[in-house]
Image (cartoon, rainbow, N blue to C red):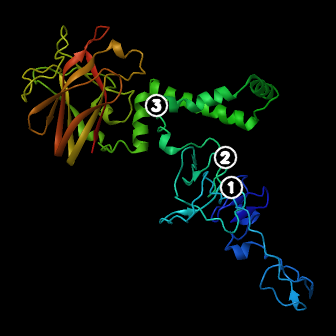
Amino acid sequence: MIVCRKCGRRTADGTEFCVCGAYLEFDGEHVPDGGGAAAASPPAAAAPPGPTGPLPPPPSAGAPASGSTWSRSPATARPAEAEPGPWSGFGGSSPTEPARPAGGIDAVHPDAPERPATTQQVWVEAGARDGDITCRQCGTPNGPERFFCRHCGMSLTGAVDASTTPPPRRVPWWKRMFRGAASKASSTDATTALHRVHGLARGGLSGRTMLFRAGGVVVLLGGLFAFLGPWSGPAKNKARELIGADRHSAIDVAPEEVSAVATDPAIPPAPFAQQGPEHVVDRFANTAWATRWLDPIGPGFEEAPDGPDCQPQPSTDTRLVFEFAEPRDIGRMQVLAGRPAVDEGRTLFRRPRVLELQVDDGPCTYVVLDDVGELVSVDFEHDDVSTVSIGIVGVYEAEAPGEAVEISEVVFER
């Protein structure tokens, strides 16, 4: 048995915390539960010896002879009154000790009076009773009068029996997402908001913080302007190269490796000053190669023709021919059709729409270009290429009359 030094309650051995919350390992005192009647009850006081001397003869027959000496015997104890039965804590007692099943505990009610030495111990089966409170931490059942767990000392406030408690409902994801913002908004009162406003009015933000925020805004606006402005094409290409998304690399083509070849010997090419074929490989968008469109009343093909056959009738007086000094493996081609988007007069001239491509002496393939004023990627994967011929068979109409159609840049990539 353990006696609490704080409240004086008696608790069964093995209990770590008292009803009042005291840790019995430090604030409890172990006392014996009580053994037999001889060990628990104080010894009866011996009757004092009576006086000795001559006694008158007894009135009954068979008394000793007159003149003999008698000794008074000790007083005979009165029969003790019937004592009440032992207190069992459950309103009754058993004359015999019950059998102790395996797993039981020896316990009595904390408010029970001290049992006499002859009181039989009550063997209580371990387990929870109706009304017990189950500890949330260790699962030990505790009586309803306890405020702390008798095993681990956990507070029992708000704890209920787990067997009668339904499982918690799962909060939907959209409520969990906005729970933090809602709690912050509800926790901010008018006084707190007013103090924050006064802090900003007094210069609560330091100059370094303001400079950092201003720099972030400038970088954000610069990035948006770079990707949405007129030079968005080069900016996107450069960004792809920096992040490693574009695995193609440009093939260096010398100016002497490209030339303008007449499409029909019977048609003399028209000269265009400062618009030679070498300009399509100079990596400058403000220079171009020009050829004459032979059909003044029609734009040619609007979609790619079917079949691998080349067109029998030319649409321009010249076509571009690339003759590489050594065979090249080409994985992609980029074409800037017409003048660049930064040129305000690009729509006054015809722009290439459908190209006819021929590798060496093989069949012709056709590609359709977008009218965006920047480099457009074209699938063009060939190995061991020695000659590439590019002709224009369809154009975007010009806003002003004219014969020229231009290509500003051609880039081969491996």
Measured as percent of width and height from the top left, residue 267 is found at: 13, 20
Measured as percent of width and height from the top left, residue 280 is found at: 31, 32
Give the labeled residue for mark 2. 145
Q: Which one is in front, 61 or 21?
A: 61
- Sequence-first disc among 2 and 1: 1
> In which quadrant will I find the N terminus?
bottom right
Q: Residues within 10 Å of mark 3 (few under 14, many from 20)?
A: few
Residue at horizontal 15 percent and vertical 23 percent from the top: 304
Give the labeled residue for mark 1. 110
**Quadrant of the image occupied by residue 191:** top right
User: What is the CA distance from the residue labelled 2 to the residue labelled 3?
Assistant: 38 Å
Give the labeled residue for mark 3. 172
Element class at badge 3: loop
Q: Amino acid at mark 2?
A: Glu
User: What is the CA distance from the residue labelled 3 to the residue labelled 1?
Assistant: 47 Å
Residue at horizontal 8 percent and vertical 37 percent from the top: 362
> Is 200 placed above or below 6 here?
above
Q: Amino acid at mark 3?
A: Pro
Residue at horizontal 77 percent and vertical 85 percent from the top: 62
Q: Residue 75, which numbered label?
A: none
> Is 141 placed above or below 285 here?
below
Q: Residues within 10 Å of mark 2 (few under 14, many from 20)?
A: few
Element class at badge 2: loop
187 relative to 179 in the view: left or right: right
Q: Which one is in front, 356 or 87?
A: 87
> Is 58 placed above or below 253 here?
below
Q: Residues within 10 Å of mark 1 (few under 14, many from 20)?
A: few
User: What is the CA distance from the residue labelled 2 to the residue labelled 1?
Assistant: 10 Å
> Is 327 placed above or below 274 here?
below
> Are the residues flagged by discs 2 and 1 in contact, CB closer than 8 Å?
yes
Measured as percent of width and height from the top left, residue 37 is found at: 69, 73
359 relative to 24 in the view: left or right: left
